[in-house]
Image (cartoon, rainbow, N blue to C red):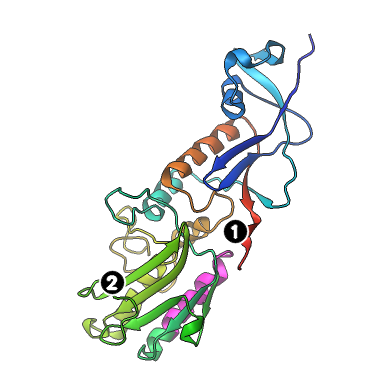
Amino acid sequence: MNKVILALTVLILCSSLSLAQHGTEGSELISLESFMQISGLKKNEVPKEAIIFKDQDTLIRARFETKANDSLISVPYDYRSKEFTDLYKKVAFVDPNRNDTIPARMRYWKDEMRVYFAEEVDRKDKKGLTAFADEIFKQVDSLKIRIVRKLEDANFIVYYSNHYEFEPRMSKTAHIDYYLSWNGAFIDRGFLRVDKERYFNDDQRLQSLKRYFFRTLGYFNGTNSLDCGSYFSTCSNAEDSLSQLDLELLQYHYSYGICKGVTLQTYDEQLESAQTYKKEGIIFSVLHDKSIFSKD
């Protein structure tokens, strides 16, 4: 008996973005369970003549096709180990109120981060933080950072306590603090304030500035799962340069190989789907709307 080859489009919606599975012009064998999941069909709705029994497994031979869409860009899925993704979830998904009233969501700078140093900021702090930002900019492709000279050109301001207060919602007593605002998942404005006089020396203050600046690149959370040599650690005393793991976590956060700006629940669903398709030998890709690449 000739088997029917089923053709379908696999589009798994992920917030405002989409995940799509692409196949070649040929066909793939996938499990009946996976087929029902991605097609939405019930078992009794699957044509019996399309079912194949092989090595005690129930399979479907399916041809996967996607329709061209000029507004979408497809990127291969960025697979990582479970250890890596478990760690990423600890640092990247934070409830802004820390009490589960708002779903934890990945947040990032879609547009260029334009940093302005207030007039009172010491030359050493400017030079050190600028070099740190430049190091990050060169190693993380989709994160754009630029130092600007005019306040009106900035969307991120670094300043000292006991001078003009650019953002009064920060802690009045903290040695250092930051504040971010966002539109959905996109961070669009930020402030970093440090009390210059409350540090033992200039090097200590600069290191603290780097640590907190790093946190503002994605509204990151510290974790005690990493040692103090990491910028993601709650006890960070990291060196001037990012560790390899710090860099990989940041690059992953800005990778277009994952669904960006999603809630933790959606991210977990994405991971589960990607692993399911990988086991079936199916190529898995992330579809982004072209607007996510725009700087407008």
| Quarter-of-image position of residue 200 | bottom left
On whether residue 293 falls in the magenta region, the answer is: no
Q: What residue sits right under mark 2 in the picture?
A: 170
| Helix, strand or loop for disc 1 | helix
Q: Is residue 146 above or below residue 77?
A: below
Secondary structure mostly seen in the magenta stretch: helix
Q: Please tell me which of labels 1 and 2 falls first in the chain.
A: 2
Which residue: 32% across, 74% down? 208
Q: Quadrant of the N terminus?
A: top right
Residue 254 appears left or right of 241:
right
* Residue segment shown in magenta: 127-143
Residue 282 appears left or right of 265:
right
Which residue: 52% across, 52% down? 260
Q: How many residues crowd mark 1 within 10 Å: few (<14), some (14–19), many (20+)?
A: some
Q: Name the residue nearer the viewer: 50 or 100.
A: 100
Q: What residue sits right under mark 1 in the picture?
A: 292
Q: Quadrant of the C terminus?
A: bottom right
Tag 1–tag 2 contact (CB < 8 Å): no
Q: Is residue 284 visible?
A: no
Identify the amino acid type marked 1.
Ile
